[in-house]
Amino acid sequence: MSRSLHERRLIDIGDRLKRLRADAAVLGEQIEHLDSEADDAELRALVSETPLADRDAREARRHADAHRRLRDDLLRSIGDLEREQDALLDRMAAELPD
């Protein structure tokens, strides 16, 4: 692969990493908020002991867990891109003239 293709690929990976990291940060903040809401709903369910409050607590926890899974997927994608970036940099370094 030519050096310019490597460089374009590195730029693309860098842009994607920036976007994914920003998305992961936003999801992290949302998870904190959703966890707090789920904790509050669970406490209300314990105090009220009603089926409706129990259902609300389960839904709030499921919502927080869904966001957590989405963030985990993003973090895996970030790791994959970082490994791809490292491999590309290694290839570029190996192709440098001595």
Image (spheres, rainbow, N blue to C red):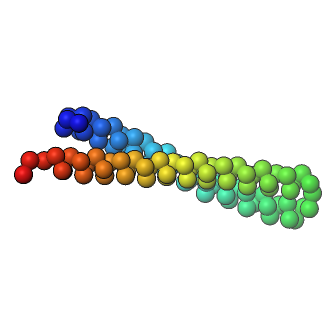
* Side (left or right) of 58 relative to 5: right
Indicate the position of residue 21 as horizontal and vertical percent values: 44, 48
Q: Nearer the viewer, residue 36 or 19?
A: 19
Please determine whether, in this image, residue 62 is positioned above or below residue 3.
below
* Side (left or right) of 62 relative to 83: right
Indicate the position of residue 10 as horizontal and vertical percent values: 29, 41
Identify the residue at image location x=92%, y=62%: 49
Indicate the position of residue 8 as horizontal and vertical percent values: 26, 35
- Which residue is the extreme one toward the left? 98
Q: Is residue 89 visible?
A: yes
Q: Nearer the viewer, residue 70 or 4?
A: 4
Identify the residue at image location x=79%, y=61%: 42
Quadrant hosting residue 16: top left
* Side (left or right) of 28 relative to 83: right
Quadrant hosting residue 41: bottom right
Identify the residue at image location x=85%, y=52%: 55
Q: Quadrant of the N terminus?
A: top left
Identify the residue at image location x=87%, y=65%: 47
Quadrant hosting residue 4: top left
Q: Nearer the viewer, residue 97 or 85?
A: 97
- Which residue is the extreme one toward the right? 50
* Side (left or right) of 40 relative to 34: right
User: How many numbered discs sit on the rendered protein?
Assistant: 0
Q: Is residue 27 visible?
A: no
Indicate the position of residue 84 as horizontal and vertical percent values: 36, 47
